[in-house]
Image (spheres, rainbow, N blue to C red):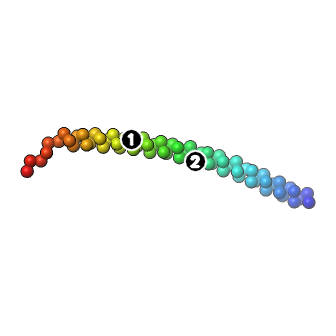
Amino acid sequence: MDMELNTLEARIDQAVNLIAALRAENSALRAQLAAGESESRELRQKINVARERLEGLLERLPEDQA
């Protein structure tokens, strides 16, 4: 009986350690995801600014006179 309790205790300890590790990994992944989403927003904004500038330059070009 004592051996079974020791085995059960060891398995519970392993489960608790695994849960703690998974929570830490989950937290790190959430932070990484948030950083990626922020970078994506910044890049989309830069693309929009570049597109607007390009459109403005294209409007200023003289039209082809064929």
Q: Residue at x 73, y 50 (%)?
A: 17
Taking the spot 30% from the left edge, 43% from the top edge, the residue there is: 51
Under circle 2, the secondary element is: helix
**Mark 2 = which residue?**
29
From this view, report whether residue 44 is shown above or below residue 6. above
Numbered disc total: 2
The residue drawn where x is 17% and y is 42% is 61
The amino acid sitting under disc 1 is: Gln
Residue underneath mark 1 = 45
What is the crowding at mark 1: few (fewer than 14 residues within 10 Å), some, or many (at least 20)?
few
- Disc 1 or 2, which lies upstream in sequence? 2
Residue 53 rendering spot, x and y as whole percentages: 28, 39
Question: Measured along the vertical axis of the image, is residue 33 above or below residue 5?
Answer: above
Q: State left or right for residue 41 relative to residue 8.
A: left
> From the viewer's perspective, is 38 left or right of 28?
left
Q: Which residue is at the front of the view, 15 or 55?
A: 55
Q: Secondary structure at mark 1?
A: helix
Rendered location of residue 39, percent (x, y)? 46, 43
User: Alpha-carbon distance for marks 1 and 2?
Assistant: 24 Å
Which residue appears farthest toward the left when viewing the image? Answer: 66
Q: Residues within 10 Å of mark 2 (few under 14, many from 20)?
A: few
Q: Give percent across and percent down for residue 12.
A: 79, 54
Which corner quadrant holds the N terminus?
bottom right
Q: Quadrant of residue 56?
A: top left
* Disc sitting over residue 20 in the figure: none
The quadrant where residue 44 appears: top left
The nearer-to-camera label among 1 and 2 is 1
Identify the residue shown where x is 43% and y is 43%. Answer: 41
